[in-house]
Image (cartoon, rainbow, N blue to C red):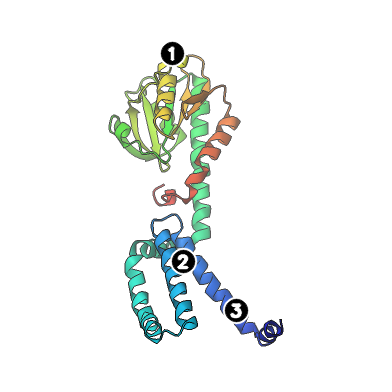
Amino acid sequence: MADVLWVLSHVQWYDIVDILLVTIVFFLVFSLAQGTQAVQLLRGMVLVVLFAFLVSRVLPFKGFSWLIENAIPALLVAIPVIFQPELRRALERLGRTGGLLARRQQEEVLEKLVNEVTHAAHRLSSERHGALIVLERETGLQDLVETGVPIDAAVKAELLRTIFHPNTPLHDKAVLVRDGRIVAASCMLPATGNPIYRDLGTRHRAAIGVTEESDALAIVVSEETGRISAAHNGQIVGHLDAGRLRNLLLAFLQHRLSGRGWTERV
């Protein structure tokens, strides 16, 4: 206890700042690697270096201590090579506008997307124009995109209403949205084979079918009744008003904020 008190009595304010700076550096390094394949490698390297350093200091192994001390400079050179993709990604993020501002921009883009889809669905519902909008999530739907007509445009309520107008050649089948953009229209979707839904219309069965095979979210507007429905995980929920649809979209798309960067493309 006396030794601890002696150490604490000799701690200066700049020692505390020094410890905080080292902690921040390690925190930032692990934060940049989080969610990548390099995080396990980084953790393993840190554990090996700490273990070797402690062994070289505690045990009287002069040769091993010399090896560890001389290996550290080589390790500092190897780290940028091993983690080159992660370092490049981190520098690109810093070169934009900063993490907090970028996240704020992504939140604004997400909210704009949700508002546009909600507004389009509400207007299509009031006009009794059938529609089927599929929002891609983690499971790629490129095979379905290739069955339709490429568009690559920002999600706008007016564009969605135009696509699903009965007099346009693209109104039949589905629109696919990826990373905040309409990638294709008139896409053919697999219909569900579940006998429970055999009495539903073609659009509703297609919406259920695509969500049975992926984690996508499908929004359906009935041409006969104007009712708005949403399908996910092979199940469908109907009688959605604009408020409920907006909340549902926000809940399902919130996880994409840390994804591929919608602010770069919208």
Residue under label 2, please give it: 29
Between the residue at mark 2 and the residue at mark 3, the CA separation in whole angstroms equals 18 Å
Q: Amino acid at mark 1?
A: Arg
Q: Secondary structure at mark 2?
A: helix
Q: Secondary structure at mark 1?
A: loop
* CA separation in Å, label 1 and label 3: 67 Å
The image position of residue 8, as x and y in percent, is 68, 83
Disc nearer the start of the sequence (1/3) = 3
Who's the residue at 47% across and 30% down the image?
Answer: 233
Q: Amino acid at mark 2?
A: Val
Q: Residues within 10 Å of mark 2 (few under 14, many from 20)?
A: some
Q: Is residue 36 left or right of residue 13?
A: left
Position in image of residue 28 (x %, y %):
49, 66
The answer to which of marks 2 and 1 sits earlier in the sequence is: 2
Q: Is residue 227 above or below residue 113?
A: above
Tag 3 secondary structure: helix
Q: Which residue is mark 3?
A: 17
The residue located at (46%, 68%) in the rendering is 47
| The N terminus: image quadrant | bottom right
Q: Which residue is mark 1?
A: 198
Q: Give residue 147's quadrant in the image.
A: top left
Determine whether, in the image, residue 1 is placed left or right of residue 196. Answer: right
**In this view, 2 is above or below 214:** below
- Which residue shows up at 47% across the image and 51% down it? 258
